[in-house]
Amino acid sequence: QKPFRREVMRAYGASVTPSPSETTAVGRKILEAHPGTSGSLGCAISEAVEVATGLPGYRYVLGSVLNQVLLHQSVIGLETKAACDKYGIKPDIIIGCAGGGSNLGGLISPFMGEKIRGEADYQFIAVEPASCPSFTRGKYVYDYCDTGMVCPLQKMYTLGSNFIPSANHAGGLRYHGMSSIVSQLYHDGMLEARSVEQTAVFEAAELFARCEGILPAPESSHAIRVAIDEAVKCKENNETKNIVIGLTGTGYFDMVAYGKYNDGEMRDVIPTDEDLQRGFATIPSFPGNE
């Protein structure tokens, strides 16, 4: 989906293998179970772990979901909070895209701290793709962080580690689970979650580009979609609110997706209850994990 990102990596000397692949045991196992699959972040994690553990001197660190990643990403929220304070802006709504949850968790962390301590109140909205609705249609249970079931269990909102979403253009948001910290906050009612279809996401992305001069990444555009929706509500209700979004990246490596949207080839694929049930069936079964 992002061939030019691959070329940038190769320009710096990296080798790039599409996942799931025939180069690892877990990759072959996934392909056997899901012939012709387009894969997912969960598949790539399993293969990367296998490769790293098989090479002396190498380590693999999950890039999302786990607590240390949210801690690292909290610099996003700290810088956002500092900018708001500098310009005397008090956000009313803070919106972030959610795949594994680390970007979202980092963005909201200092604001959420204030909310938990009773120092201020904010409305937090996590936005996920309708094709991979971990929050809005998932289960809050212990599950594996990867499709190959190599990584430790985490309690999180999940669609099941074996759930592989359709070949959509949600980019890094195509992950079956959600950070345990962000999941706990959602479970406790501290933040909301919305799911959006990809054609509506790209519609919002192009409107944003034409207004702001920045071509947003598909992941970021999920937050943009809901920010526009919330702004329209404010206009209809004659309200004034400060809406903060996390712009997670630019979309210049995503021109294949933009091309499909502009050519009318993009379709919305939303999993059925039966599709989700196949993923739920792989959730570990033990007392209290229902």
Image: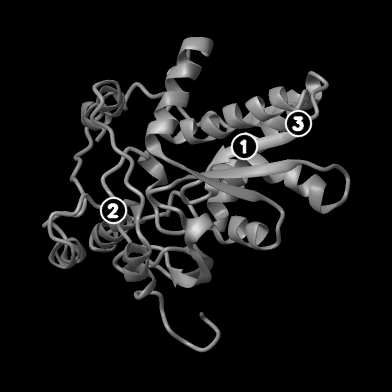
Labelled disc at residue 75: none
Question: How far apart, in angstroms, are the residues tagged by discs 2 and 1?
Answer: 27 Å
Expressed as whole percent of the image width and height from the top left, the position of residue 278 reads 31, 70
Given residues 61 and 235, the one toward you in this image is 235
Q: Residue at x 21, y 51 (%)?
A: 19
Quarter of image, res 246 = top right
Classify mark 3: residues with Cα within 10 Å, few (<14), some (14-19) or many (20+). Answer: some
Mark in the foreground, 3 or 2: 3
Classify mark 1: residues with Cα within 10 Å, few (<14), some (14-19) or many (20+). Answer: many
For residue 142, above or below residue 213? below
Give amino acid for label 3.
Pro
Expressed as whole percent of the image width and height from the top left, the position of residue 244 reads 66, 29
Labelled disc at residue 44: 2
Q: Where is the N terminus found, in terms of image quarters? A: top left
Given residues 53 and 128, the one toward you in this image is 128
> Disc 1 marks which residue?
95
